[in-house]
Image: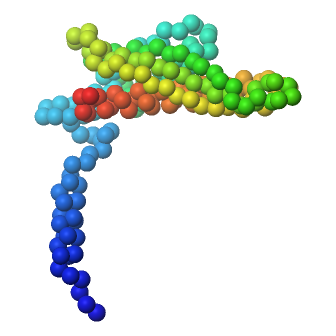
Amino acid sequence: MSLPSSPRILRLLLTLSLAGLTAGCFQPLYGERTLGAGDSPISAKMSAVEVAPVKESAGSRLGRVGVEMRDQLIFGLTGGGPTPASDYRLEITLSAVQLQVIVDITSARPEIQNYGINATYVLFDNATGKPVVRDTTFARVSYNIPGQLQRFAGDRGLRDAENRAAKVIADNIRSRLASHFVAGT
């Protein structure tokens, strides 16, 4: 049995040593580490964001989705814990879209629909009042409408789709804010 040639071994050792050097560069985004010398951990920065109520008509479908999205976002930012004094204020505006994907050719009624939310949000620094982050995000989910005689099932499918879209929007905003607090972008 022969040994592999020495250039192959050297390349392998070089590759492993470079991998070992860069291994310490990766850190978890939501870990309990500080952002810089004397800074608080990212979880403290995230929980210091006050999420303003979404300005939609009370009792409207989009108003209910706004409340659901805000609750999901507050829980995602604070982890369910108490909120400290807010250093930032987050304002969000929503718009909804619906699109028929599959239509029954005999009755011309929709069978599958897409529900979507478009969100525009701005993070303000409370100390200066200036916007720090301004961005948009969206979510698209589909749901079934089971038939003409099952109106409640169709309404429930729409409500579940709204809740799923609100969760996606909240997760997108949370990830973007975490990115801002870690990288400053």
Residue extending farthest to the bottom is: 1
Q: Quadrant of residue 98?
A: top right
Q: Is residue 67 visible?
A: no
Which quadrant, please, contains the C terminus?
Answer: top left
Q: Is residue 114 above or below residue 88?
A: below
Q: Is residue 64 left or right of residue 101?
A: left
Q: Quadrant of residue 40?
A: top left
- Residue 64 x/y as whole percent: 58, 16
Q: Quadrant of residue 134?
A: top left
- Residue 50 x/y as whole percent: 36, 17
Q: Is residue 8 left or right of residue 107?
A: left
Q: Residue at x 61, y 11 (%)?
A: 60
Residue extending farthest to the top is: 57
Q: Residue at x 20, y 34 (%)?
A: 35
Which quadrant, please, contains the N terminus?
Answer: bottom left
Q: Residue at x 17, y 66 (%)?
A: 14
Q: Is residue 167 above or below residue 14?
A: above
Q: Is residue 145 visible?
A: yes
Q: Is residue 174 above or below residue 123?
A: below
- Residue 137 x/y as whole percent: 45, 25
Depth order, front residue of 25/33: 25
**Number of numbered callouts drawn:** 0
Depth order, front residue of 97/65: 97
- Residue 65 x/y as whole percent: 56, 19
Q: Residue at x 25, y 48 (%)?
A: 26
Colouring mode (rainbow / by chain / secondary structure / one colour): rainbow
Q: Is residue 123 above or below residue 29?
A: above
